[in-house]
Image (tube, rainbow, N blue to C red):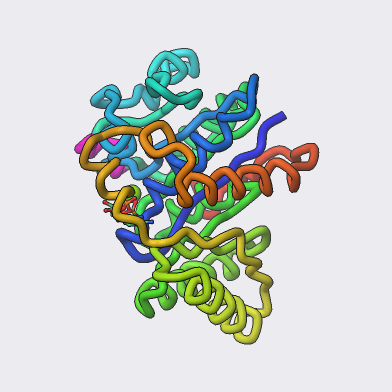
Amino acid sequence: MTAIVTVASGKGGTGKTWFAASLAQALALAPGRRVLLVDADWGLANADVQLGTSAPAELPVAAPLEALVGCIRRVPGTGVDLLAAGSGSGRLADLAPRDRLALARKVAAIARAYDWTVIDLAAGADRSLRDWWRLGRHRMLVVTPDPGALTDAYAFLKLARADGDAGRAEVVVNRAPSRAVGDATAAKLERAVGHFLKVPLPARGVVLDDPRVTAAIRAQTPFLARYPGTATTLTLEHLARGLARAQKPSAQPSLRPSEPAT
Ligand SMILES: Nc1ncnc2c1ncn2[C@@H]1O[C@H](COP(=O)(O)OP(=O)(O)OP(=O)(O)O)[C@@H](O)[C@H]1O
Ligand SMILES: [Mg+2]
């Protein structure tokens, strides 16, 4: 049984990669729990850089599943396995829809060997991103209190709704200057989405702006290992516990193609 968490935002730079990587670390704190982090920002992947580990230059997309499994690396100091292609693997960014779907199928198959799989997506809202988004049992939109981030998250969800995939969405407010601002930001987006798109968007949590995040990224060290016991780490642990509680026996991830294979 696996639970897949997909992490999108619309706008770039809201903290998706850091959040996805840190959530994976928090999930992996439970003894015996198998956690996979997938950097699906194909072409501009940087989870490996943030975590101070290495990734193969290219992923063998067309090769048998075992070759892809062979690309998984354990992130030192965490219980997290990472599947990523090094930054600049342009071939992955330009995959044809049929190959994209084949890759998503393989990732979903690999995910079955894990209790949790967290998939970090690229910025944007294009079709290929939404194909990955729908794999999530939990589909998280990471926003900041910046109005541009809210507008883009709204636009992402509007497109996902048109695909029939706005369900199971949740919002995480990152870089909030205070808990109150974070809560108000989540409520504002939830209201707009509820009113205009008629879909629920519950808040999964609020992460405060914390200079340690930038420090950990610059030091290329997993956040939870570098800053255990800090307020931000406790927030992530709380989020992970909430997810684990919400976990029910999973359905198979949805892999229907959203466009004709070419
Ligand atoms: N909670 C936080 N507090 C302070 N700074 C943060 C926080 N979260 C993220 N950042 C900063 O935001 C920067 C961008 O983070 P990250 O690369 O994870 O964003 P992203 O959404 O994945 O970006 P992209 O859209 O380019 O993939 C980080 O380098 C870090 O400095
Ligand atoms: Mg990123």
Q: Is residue 7 left or right of residue 112?
A: left
Q: Is residue 158 magenta?
A: no
Please state the horizontal and vertical placement of residue 62, each as a whole percent of the image.
39, 24
Please state the horizontal and vertical placement of residue 19, each as a whole percent of the image.
43, 48
Q: On the image, which quarter does residue 221 sit in?
A: top left
Q: Is residue 152 left or right of residue 162?
A: left
Q: Can the viewer see residue 262 in this picture?
A: no
Q: Residue at the spot x=61%, y=59% of the render?
A: 204
Q: On the image, which quarter does residue 168 sit in?
A: bottom right
Q: Residue at the spot x=37%, y=61% of the render?
A: 209
Residue lying furthest front in this view?
229
Q: Is residue 238 above or below residue 198?
A: above
Q: Nearer the viewer, residue 99 or 181?
A: 181
Which quadrant is the C terminus positioned in?
A: top left
Q: Is residue 77 above or below residue 202?
A: above
Q: Residue at the spot x=71%, y=38% of the render?
A: 252
Q: Is residue 89 magenta?
A: yes
Which quadrant is the N terminus positioned in?
A: top right
Q: Can the viewer see residue 82 in this picture?
A: yes
Q: Is residue 14 left or right of residue 170?
A: left
Q: Nearer the viewer, residue 216 or 245?
A: 216
Please state the horizontal and vertical placement of residue 234, each as a whole percent of the image.
53, 46
Residue lying furthest right in this view?
249
Q: Which residues are magenta?
A: 87-94
Please state the horizontal and vertical placement of residue 225, each as a whole percent of the image.
41, 31
- State how many labels appear: 0
Q: Residue at the spot x=48%, y=45% of the render?
A: 233
Q: Is residue 73 above or below residue 121?
A: above
Residue lying furthest bottom in this view?
195
